[in-house]
Image: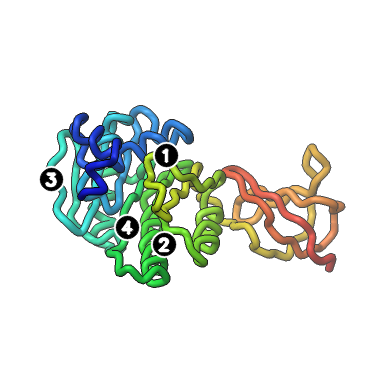
Amino acid sequence: MARDRRDSYYWQAKRDGYRSRATFKLTQINRKFEVINEGDTIVDLGAAPGGWLQIAKELSGGRVIGVDLQRIKPIDGVDTIKGDMTADRTIEKIINLVGKDGADVVICDAAPNLSGNWSLDHARSIDLVTSALGCAKKILKPQGHFVVKVFEGDMFKGFIDKVRNNFTYVRAYTPKASRSQSAEIYIIGKKFLTAPLRKGDEFEVTIKKLGSSGDGAITIEGFVTFVKDVEVGEHVRIKINDVKPNFAFANVIERL
């Protein structure tokens, strides 16, 4: 508490009526990345005590839902769910509130209970954010956005790669409101991919036509994929190297 009382963001949160200094982190993230837009439906995972819920409601003015294992004190215009984000019952409750089209944005500023053992705390953080990503994939609408806090460590790269497999645009960012001694970093994923393909997938295909750019144009599970350096009639093994919301790109790894 003594540390907080020397913290300008702590005092600003008190003056402005916010429940936590973390409010300013989301404000700064949104100013830089424009994750939340007016009218968006937003789900906040691990939302207690509600600082991010308050600012999410201000930024969007739309429907905002907070989920936490703890009860969240009521906030005007915000729905709350007491439950585990990994539980099917909780997912059903979220979907009932956001509608079948899904949420525009999923945010998560949750942190695990800290033990003081850095390796253990980092592993717990990765487990928590992996659960948040899994929940986001079930409730986000196509092209939706995702923001999550994670502690840096040796498993960080593996997690951010998972986010990259599911979003077109991914960045890591530390807002100014984060304490200088903190190892927290925020992952921002924009434009949720609902394509049936993922980067690194391999397929055997026959090139039946060329696109306007001269690349091979094929359809995999109804999804258009462009293949470089091929001719019509070639049978090749390809590897997906990039996925966009409406199409993918691949390279030939073997000519068959």
Label 2 environment density (alpha carbons within 10 Å; few <14, some 14–19, many ≥20): some
- Residue 179 vs residue 151, the one in the foreground: 179
Q: Which amino acid does label 1 sit on?
A: Lys
Residue at figure coordinates x 26%, y 48% from the top left: 3
| Inter-mark Cα distance, 3 to 2 | 26 Å
Q: What residue type is labelled 3?
A: Lys
- Residue 214 vs residue 81, the one in the foreground: 81
Residue 73: give its label. 3
For label 3, the SS is loop
**Marked residue nearer the N-terminal end (4 or 2):** 4
Residue at image mark 2: 130
- Residue 111 is situated, as x and y percent measured from the top left of the image, at 32, 57
| Inter-mark Cα distance, 3 to 1 | 27 Å
Q: What residue type is labelled 4?
A: Ala
Q: Nearer the viewer, mark 4 or mark 2?
A: 4
For the residues labelled 3 and 1, say whether their Cβ atoms are less than 8 Å apart: no
| Inter-mark Cα distance, 4 to 3 | 19 Å
Residue 176: give its label. 1
Residue at figure coordinates x 30%, y 43% from the top left: 22
Q: Is residue 154 above or below residue 94?
A: below
